[in-house]
Image (spheres, rainbow, N blue to C red):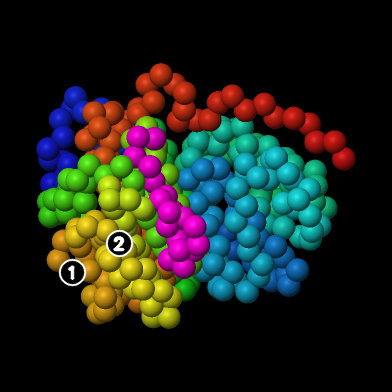
Amino acid sequence: MTPPFGTLSSDDGAAHTVREIAQQPALWREVDKIVTASRDSLDAFLRPLIARDDLRVVLTGAGTSAFAGQVLQPALARRLKRRVDAVPTTDLVADPHGCLAEDVPTLLVSFARSGDSPESVAATTLADQVLSEVHHLVITCNEQGRLAREHTQQPKSHVLLMPPGSNDRGFAMTSSFTCMTLAALLALGGSAYDGVAERLARAAESITESSAVDRTVGALLKSEPERIVFLGSGPLKGLAEESALKVLELTGGTLMAVAESALGFRHGPKAVLNDRSVAVVYMSNDPYTRKYDQDIYAELCGNLPAGSVVTVSADSGAGTQGSGADAWPLPGLDGVEDVALALSAVVYAQLIALRASLARGLRPDNPFPSGEINRVVQGVTLHSLQH
């Protein structure tokens, strides 16, 4: 087992979660190979659609899968020069006429770890009902899931399967999230992201294979915080949302976690801060955007005790961004777009969530043993849409 996890025993109830965090660099290399091998069929499916000026791209999923869309949306909108929206399946299923109000040619990109959550298939079915023309790119980790099975042979669908190991067995999505996000970036972003998977993998390995990282994560949690704030701008706001969800899930809701943008935090959400709070600021690689991240970092340092605010950054020359144990590095990712940066950066959040869960005496692989929240969502009643 790699050094950060060396203190864990087989009795900690974290075996799946630990393995699924640590395996991500290897799986990203597999994803890169899968997309490369699928390039001809992907291009045959996608190019005619992307060429259409009136195309709308909708990125959809539930929970963590929805945050994949939030991370991707700003970058894909710039890259494709088309309208790209991140719309959770939970919104789409509840209000299909509102979410799909414009009847324009649509590419619905569905993210699903299992493909068996009630909303996963319902979202694609409702899109077919509401829109005159919709095409489906399904990115999933489960070949046997209902979503994959129902779309594999459909003429207006393309199913992109992730490596089998990405179908996380732990409660919370870790490698499934990063693999699906990377796959969509490579599939839709094209040659602009050639080589990025290897850079991300090396950066993540510097985190998962470093005993120093485990110590710095432990230092952040040493004060036994009752609230944690994640802040990021642009694609890194989606990363902040996913980071907060990981902490909520793995700690069974016992550690309050909040996410916002660097600028948005002052507009009310800052009220969450107290003297038992810690904060993680994701620093953008964009020089303009980073100025706002630096501002909120400096402000938080004035609001919270020393050692309670950390930055995650690829740019060692980013100015006011923390130092020593308060500056968590992403080596080798200088100049990488934030949409890609997020995939290595989230590993820090996953480790925070893992350690916070264990500190509370929970079992990260199943933090809700009584079953009130399940790995695959249950209890959803799907209703027929009346036109």
**Going from the N terminus, do you reach mark 2 or mark 1 first?**
2
Q: Is 1 rendered above or below residue 204?
A: above
Whether residue 220 sits left or right of residue 339 in the image: it is: left
Which residue shows up at 78% across the image and 31% down it? 384
Mark drawn on residue 323: 1
Which residue shows up at 27% across the image and 71% down it? 321
Give how far across and how far down residue 364 sits, in percent. 30, 32
Give how far across and how far down residue 221 sits, in percent. 22, 46
* Measured Cα–Cα span from mark 2 to mark 1: 17 Å
Give how far across and how far down residue 26 sits, in percent. 30, 51
Q: Secondary structure at mark 2?
A: helix
Residue that carries the numbered disc 2 in the rendered image = 303
Which residue shows up at 19% across the image and 60% down it? 306
Give how far across and how far down residue 95 sits, in percent. 73, 44
- Contact between marks 2 and 1 (CB within 8 A): the answer is no
Q: Secondary structure at mark 1?
A: loop
Task: Point out the frontmost of discs 2 and 1.
Answer: 2
Which residues are drawn in magenta?
253-272
**291 or 196, which lies in front?**
291
Which residue shows up at 45% across the image and 61% down it? 265
Whether residue 168 sits left or right of residue 135 in the image: it is: left
